[in-house]
Image (tube, coloured by chain):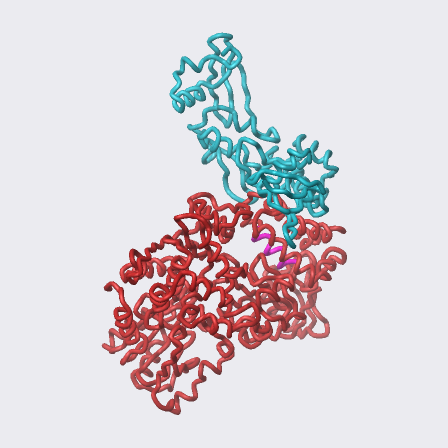
């Protein structure tokens, strides 16, 4: 890799990268993000490499990040000159020979691809390049186009623009997608103030959850007194079920790095830190490689693009504390101390890391910056809704058919995300609620299914955008149990510095455990409410002050479930074991004997073709009988 | 100087002062546990919360950390403030049911224990105010004790709960502890604290055992004063 000092150098790298992205021979890309690897992508990659070598095929084998549709991984993309790009889902090492046969023959007659792509989008360059010159052949036309797949139809990928599209190990491929051209533009053609104005005009709000306007933050930090300033990237994503930032750091690390260099130039910072949780080893490795490449090219170092601007970037690894996602705790941790937050009456943009002006944004925010600088604020504000420009990346998990990472324009109705992109609830069950914003967020009920998914609407509804986790729950979810789950998580993750959070969350957990165990007392609900208010007002940091949100939002929308638990000693969803009883419906039971065989405690008895009976003294309420009954004859009450 | 209102009273204060300092200077009582003049405030106990109105925004802040500001309106006794203080006191009373200091404070504030909070048995009287840790680190400068673990497992102790070899037995941690949790036993020629026994120095004039030898050695090293100049107790100097 040689230094890239001029636009000419950058264009040369772009040309190299373009040849790698759309090569003149066959290329197979394996989705090797964590989600891919977890479902077996490494075995698929190894099988492909072995088979290609054995057959002496002239095929390029490449790696890429996660496209988002995790439920169909491992995913491989096959590109052949002048043919649509084909995605094969749920790949296995076993399927490899057959898929290679097809590739060699140039036909699609065996393993069917999940979808095809006809063109490649170069968002930062405002360009689209077709893979096929002329019409798509008939046999390929039968494969659904990506634009017709419900999961992708309504998505718009900005922050995740390169995830699943480029080889995350190649800086040339990133440059070919328009990468580092924004940095060139910013450093050679724009003044720092102009960049800040552009980011302000774009309306980009912090994607870490707070939604604070990024440009305003940058401006305050630029104006803050101090020779040494820092830019920090918060990659300490720790919400259960959220992995957007991981996917970006793994699949497109350069987008974060480029965003940070631009931000540092605008703010006047010469040092940056990316704080990543160490539980993301692939993200750490990919970022490390990318920082090394950027340094070799001269994007990090002295006199970048001959502008006189110097910048260095380092990685700080988190030690497994959720609270370190909070900005002040993160900075304390970066300083080498135990990650505890401090009061923010004096903002970190003025007194942050080592008491110096520090500008912290999260992964997704930084990844948006190069696109904004390249395409302009006006373009960015044309996406999304009022005061919420651009897109937001979410992770759809839980009781939903299409589990995966999605990026949509802000303001999209929740129902489109759940039912169209997410494909609805599995097993024909009813939607009950969705938890947005992670443990500090809240549960939204079916009545709010049309809500506009943006920072302000979610906040008003008692939840929040958070970093973007979306946990979908169906009718078999008990909302008291859910609140208990999140409070339990927060009890474990509380740093323990302030009394309301350390002691209060622990007491709330005890009360919720009692309620779920059928030991709820009159007044418990009111006590939870008053404690929640105390926590909102009294806790030191955002983890503590929002810790009561799961309780407050479930109480707001599902109060009757709490009342049923406390007063009637019933769990309407049939989840809390102490409050439910399994029995057999005389009407529906055919006496098939399946439940009898499956019961682990042998507490079901009955003759063939006669109604079976459950011995309540031996029943452990595991639910195996209900799951195995084909006639819906097991009653839970 | 900045002008603002606290509990309906117009006050003038030096810039950089905290609301708590100004309140106390004006004879307005605000309860605290983790605040001490010798160490920097951390805002961990949350008892000193007050309600501050700045412009259109009203919020609860910790007065030990919040810097005074022109035009703010401070209410030290609003309902929201009382609710936080009540919660904090009830939580601490459940954590440290033995503490008389907490009982007295609660009585003065008119707060009863919350029966739904089961009293704990293994926390002693420690409210985790961290004054001891700050005093040891910032004032004495030895860091013999620190905070261990996080969340409900958080505790104060020596590294790996073993004898601290840097401890000089000065007892600053015990003196600063607001709830008398840290036990320091003195018996004539010896003093026991944090599991270690320290040899005491007798005053060369009156013969009273007045300080651990390790502490005097530490002072001698830090200040360059000879040991012979340090073996006289304060009363005899």
Q: Is residue B78 visible?
A: yes
* Residue at horizontal 48 percent and vertical 83 percent from the top: A148
Q: Can residue A508 be seen in this view?
A: no
Spot the residue most to the front. Answer: B1
Residue A439 lies in the magenta-colored region:
no
**Up-down relation of residue A539 to residue A167 (above or below):** above
What letter labels the chain drawn in cyan?
B
**Up-down relation of residue A633 to residue A306 (above or below):** below
- Residue A119 at x, y percent in the picture: 39, 81
- Residue A288 at x, y percent in the picture: 34, 57
* Residue at horizontal 23 percent and vertical 77 percent from the top: A56
The foreground one among A480 and A498 is A498
Residue B70 located left or right of residue A560: left
The span shown in magenta is: A480-490
The foreground one among A558 and B3 is B3
Q: In which quarter of the image is the N terminus of chain B?
A: top right
Magenta: main secondary structure: helix
Dividing the picture into quadrants, the one containing residue A412 is bottom right
The foreground one among B21 and A99 is B21
- Residue A307 at x, y percent in the picture: 31, 60
The foreground one among A423 and A521 is A423
**Up-down relation of residue B106 to residue A272 (above or below):** above
Dividing the picture into quadrants, the one containing residue A475 is bottom right
What letter labels the chain drawn in red?
A
Q: How many labels does the image show?
A: 0
Residue A483 lies in the magenta-colored region:
yes
**Up-down relation of residue A473 to residue B45 (above or below):** below
- Residue B34 at x, y percent in the picture: 59, 36
Residue A117 located left or right of residue B149: left
């Amino acid at each position: 890799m040689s230094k890239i000092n001029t636009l000419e150098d950058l264009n040369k790298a772009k040309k190299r990268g373009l040849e790698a992205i759309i090569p003149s021979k066959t290329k197979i890309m394996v989705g090797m993000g964590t989600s891919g690897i977890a479902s077996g992508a490494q075995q698929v990659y190894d099988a492909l490499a072995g088979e290609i070598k054995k057959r002496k095929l002239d095929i390029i084998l490449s790696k890429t990040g996660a496209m988002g549709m995790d439920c169909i991984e491992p995913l491989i993309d096959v590109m052949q000159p002048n043919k649509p790009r084909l995605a094969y889902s749920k790949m296995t090492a076993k399927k490899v020979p057959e898929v290679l046969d097809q590739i060699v023959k140039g036909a699609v007659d065996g393993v069917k691809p999940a979808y095809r792509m006809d063109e490649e989008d170069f968002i930062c360059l405002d360009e689209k390049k077709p893979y096929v010159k002329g019409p798509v052949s008939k046999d390929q036309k039968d494969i659904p186009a990506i634009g017709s797949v419900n999961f992708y139809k309504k998505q718009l990928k900005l922050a995740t623009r390169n995830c699943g599209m480029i080889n995350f190990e190649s800086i040339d491929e990133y440059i070919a997608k328009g990468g580092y051209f924004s940095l060139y533009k910013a450093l050679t053609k724009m003044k720092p103030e102009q960049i800040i104005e552009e980011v302000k005009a774009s309306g980009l709000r912090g994607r870490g959850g707070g939604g604070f306007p990024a440009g305003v933050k940058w401006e305050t930090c630029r104006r803050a007194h101090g020779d040494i300033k820092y830019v920090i990237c918060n990659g300490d994503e720790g919400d259960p079920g959220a992995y957007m930032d991981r996917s970006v750091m793994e699949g497109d690390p350069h987008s974060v790095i480029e965003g940070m260099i631009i931000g540092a130039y605008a703010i006047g910072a010469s040092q940056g830190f990316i704080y990543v949780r160490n539980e993301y080893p692939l993200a750490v490795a990919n970022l490390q490689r990318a920082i090394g490449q950027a340094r070799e090219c001269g994007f990090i170092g002295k006199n970048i693009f001959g502008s006189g601007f110097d910048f260095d970037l380092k990685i700080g690894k988190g030690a497994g504390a959720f609270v370190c996602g909070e900005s002040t705790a993160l900075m304390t941790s970066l300083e080498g101390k135990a990650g505890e937050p401090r009061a923010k009456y004096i903002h970190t943009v003025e007194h942050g890391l080592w008491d110096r002006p520090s500008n912290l944004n999260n992964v997704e925010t930084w990844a948006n910056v190069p696109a904004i600088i390249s395409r302009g604020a006006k373009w960015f504000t044309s996406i999304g809704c009022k005061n919420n420009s651009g897109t937001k990346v979410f992770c759809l998990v839980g009781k939903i058919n299409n589990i995966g990472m999605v990026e949509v324009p802000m303001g999209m109705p929740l129902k489109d995300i759940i039912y169209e992109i997410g494909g609805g609830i599995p097993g024909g069950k009813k939607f009950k609620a969705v938890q947005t914003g992670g443990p500090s967020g809240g549960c939204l009920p079916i009545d709010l299914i049309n809500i506009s998914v943006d920072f302000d609407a979610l906040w008003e509804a008692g939840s929040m955008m958070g970093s973007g986790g979306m946990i979908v729950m169906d009718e078999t979810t008990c909302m008291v149990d859910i609140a208990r789950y999140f409070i339990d998580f927060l009890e474990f993750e509380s740093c323990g510095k302030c009394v309301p959070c350390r002691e209060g969350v622990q007491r709330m957990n005890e009360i919720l455990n009692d309620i779920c165990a059928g030991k709820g007392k009159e007044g418990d609900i009111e006590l939870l409410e008053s404690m929640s208010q105390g926590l909102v007002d009294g806790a030191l940091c955002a983890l503590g002050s929002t810790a009561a949100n799961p309780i407050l939002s479930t109480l707001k929308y599902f109060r009757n479930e709490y009342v049923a638990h406390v007063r009637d000693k019933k769990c309407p969803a049939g989840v809390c074991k102490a409050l439910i009883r399994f029995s057999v419906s005389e009407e529906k039971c055919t006496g098939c004997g399946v439940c009898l065989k499956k019961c682990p405690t042998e507490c079901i008895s009955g003759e063939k073709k006669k109604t079976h009976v459950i011995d309540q003294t031996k029943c452990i309420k595991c639910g195996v009988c209900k799951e195995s009954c084909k006639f819906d004859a097991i009653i839970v009450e | 100087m900045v002008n603002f209102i606290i509990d309906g009273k117009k006050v003038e204060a030096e810039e950089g002062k905290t609301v708590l300092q100004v309140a106390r200077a004006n004879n307005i009582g605000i309860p605290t546990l983790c605040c001490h003049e010798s160490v920097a405030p951390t805002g961990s106990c949350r008892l000193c919360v007050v309600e501050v109105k700045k412009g259109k925004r009203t919020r609860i802040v910790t007065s030990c950390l919040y810097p005074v500001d022109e035009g703010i309106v401070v209410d030290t006794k609003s309902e929201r403030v009382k609710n936080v203080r009540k919660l904090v006191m009830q939580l601490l009373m459940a954590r440290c049911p033995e503490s008389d200091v907490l009982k007295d404070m609660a009585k003065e504030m008119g707060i009863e224990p919350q029966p739904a909070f089961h009293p704990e048995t293994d926390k002693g009287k420690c409210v985790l105010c961290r004054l001891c840790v700050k005093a040891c680190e910032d004032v004495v400068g030895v860091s013999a004790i620190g905070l261990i673990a996080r969340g409900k497992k958080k505790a104060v102790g020596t590294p790996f709960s073993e004898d601290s070899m840097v401890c000089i037995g000065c007892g600053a941690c015990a003196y600063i502890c607001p709830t008398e949790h840290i036990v320091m036993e003195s018996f004539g020629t010896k003093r026991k604290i944090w599991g270690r026994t320290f040899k005491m120095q007798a005053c060369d004039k009156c013969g009273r055992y007045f300080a651990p030898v390790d502490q005097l050695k530490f002072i001698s090293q830090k200040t360059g004063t000879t040991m012979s100049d340090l073996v006289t107790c304060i009363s005899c100097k």
